[in-house]
Amino acid sequence: MTDPEVDQPNSSLTQDEVRGVVAKEVILALGLVVLILGAMWISTGSFPPMVVVESGSMMHDLDDGSVGAIDAGDLILVMNPSRKQIITLVEATQEENPNYNYNSHGMPGDVIIYKKNGGNETPVIHRALLKVVANSTLAGSETWDVSGTNITNVESISMTLDYNCRFHGNLTIINWIPTHEGYLTTGDNPITNGCKIDQLAATGQDPRNGLKDEFGNPVTAVKEEWVLGIASSEIPWVGSIKLLASGNHHSVTESSWLNLTFSVILLLAIPGIIEGIPKISNPEEE
């Protein structure tokens, strides 16, 4: 007796069906990207919600980089300044300050993303050292306060920060007369940026310091409106792919490339690992 014929499903797909499957997968992938970006936008209040670090100016370990610090090739989530108060290094290093011992990305104080003199160049991601606020006296001359410190109502600012420099002692502000309110900033890299203040005027015109804008002008104190965001969580190494594609990958360390490669291999292997886990049946269901 022959078994009755059973219709077998046709495993071959037409070209239209293949296109339909591909289109579905593309739509799902794009939808996932939009969903992730949307969630980040809602969380940070910024768009784009992240930036790729291009240089090594914030690195703490020059050879291998370090998780927790900001290295070239890291993706950094950017918190909208309206969502969070910027805490400066001087506020985080004074015992009487309520923000004492506050740390971000491996050092005291927040890291900010800002436009140099409000221009259109690639923004800078550096640590906020202090904020100067203007006062108007009865005599009409302008004086200044350093937020979070006992320096108030002064015509010029001189102070030593609790920021040890490898080559020349602690970081020092020398007879600085601000032209407007704003933040002084620096990179964390102990060789290329540590103890080199971005704002030359605050250093007694020490030529070892200072950044310049796109027109060759010295960078001044960072106004609130020039601050694009505050550096929040980091996703290490992933941004190296973008830097490689754009040819700006020279600051990415060998260790970062190795960590990125290992992470990608592990990510691709996870589905196979899960699929290979033996399934245990429930005897009651048999």
Image: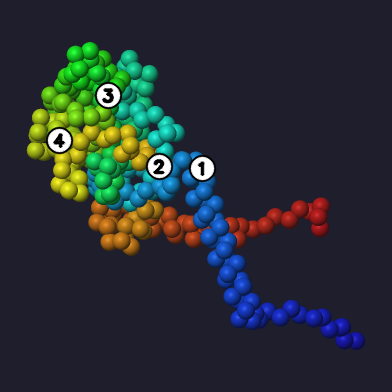
Determine whether the residue tagged by mark 1 lies in a helix, strand or loop. helix
Determine whether the residue tagged by mark 4 lies in a helix, strand or loop. helix
Q: Amino acid at mark 1?
A: Ile
Front: mark 1 or 3: 3
Mark toward the start of the polypeptide (3 vs 4): 3
Disc 2 designates what residue?
78
Q: Amino acid at mark 2?
A: Val
Q: Residue at x 34, y 55 (%)?
A: 240
Query: Residue 129: x and y, percent?
Result: 26, 30
Badge 4 crowding class, 10 Å Cα cut-off, few under 14, some 14 to 19, many 20 or more, is many
Mark toward the start of the polypeptide (2 vs 1): 1
Badge 1 crowding class, 10 Å Cα cut-off, few under 14, some 14 to 19, many 20 or more, is few
Disc 4 designates what residue?
200
Q: Residue at x 32, y 34 (%)?
A: 224
Disc 1 designates what residue?
42
Quarter of the image holding residue 241?
Answer: bottom left
Front: mark 3 or 4: 3
Determine whether the residue tagged by mark 2 lies in a helix, strand or loop. strand
Quarter of the image holding residue 172?
Answer: top left
Query: Residue 61: x and y, percent?
Result: 26, 42
Pick the front one: 107 or 64: 107
Query: Residue 184: x and y, percent?
Result: 24, 32
Disc 3 designates what residue?
133
* Residue 64 at least partly seen: no
Mark toward the start of the polypeptide (4 vs 2): 2
Q: Tell me if residue 40 comes above or below residue 135 in the rendering.
A: below
Query: Does the residue at mark 3 contact the one at mark 4 (Cβ under 8 Å)?
Result: no
Residue 91's disc number: none
Distance of mark 2 from mark 3, alpha carbons?
25 Å
Mark toward the start of the polypeptide (1 vs 3): 1
Query: Does the residue at mark 2 contact the one at mark 3 (Cβ under 8 Å)?
Result: no
Pick the front one: 83 or 139: 139
